[in-house]
Amino acid sequence: MRTEEIDFEACRRKIGEKREQFRAFYALLLAYNAKFNLTAVTEEEEVFHKHFLDSLAGERFLPENARCAEVGSGAGFPSIPLKIVREDLRLTLIESTGKKCDFLRAAVRELDLKNVEVLHARAEEVGMQEGYREGFDVCFARAVARMNTLSEYCLPLVKVGGKFLAYKSDSEEEFREAIPAMRTLGGENCGFTRYELPDGYGARMLMYCEKIKPTPKKYPRGRGLERRSPIV
């Protein structure tokens, strides 16, 4: 639980090596954002720092050839930047809004990304489905819900021995609040790392835990209980 120096120069180099795909993704984001309101961050430098660099901050948590789920994919952060630089990853993007799924499918198609599945579904439904429940090496999410709620969406998808990873604003209180939920859902070795985005773009946190035992069958509960009545 510490402030960590993310090697953002290495992240910049990786983006540079895939410059054309990142440019195409940015153009697609602007085009769809005019219709679907995907993100409030649209200026190029802001997108580069707050979306592209921030997405790559968590790359070290992803094992080679990992099968990964993303909950609440939205505009495709962090999944699309991670996939651009890590062709080995196998991704399932879970998004409940149809128009956002249309954007994600367009991004996958136009950027020629392989082994990416887009599911138009709610995470609490997918977490109960055979083939998805406890089927992923890593489940990650960014800007979806408070950590105690997010744990119930994500940890049922993680296999024993896998990891849950959340991109969050800098809030140790939110992390501490979520520890009971993560443990109830099969998580342990919970922790976080703080980092600063370059050029003054803000303090961020990666919160995580390991899945050490199966999630009890009653979770996720569904019917909005994850938000209305988080595990304590």
Image (cartoon, rainbow, N blue to C red):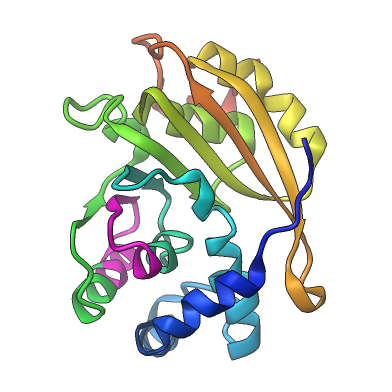
Q: Nearer the viewer, residue 182 or 83?
A: 83
Give yes or no for residue 19 being in the magenta stretch: no
Q: Nearer the viewer, residue 104 or 37?
A: 104
Above-or-below relation of 151 to 39:
above
Above-or-below relation of 224 to 168:
above
Q: Position of residue 106 (x, y in %)?
A: 24, 75
Give yes or no for residue 94 being in the magenta stretch: yes
Whether residue 102 sits left or right of residue 5 in the image: it is left
Above-or-below relation of 189 to 60:
above
Give the tally of numbered discs.
0
Which region is colored magenta?
A: 83-104
Whether residue 49 sits left or right of residue 170 in the image: it is left
Q: Position of residue 82 (x, y in %)?
A: 42, 62
Q: Residue at x 51, y 44 (%)?
A: 61
Above-or-below relation of 192 to 28:
above
Quarter of the image that includes the C terminus: top right
Q: Residue at x 70, y 38 (%)?
A: 192
- Quarter of image, res 196: bottom right
Q: Residue at x 35, y 83 (%)?
A: 21
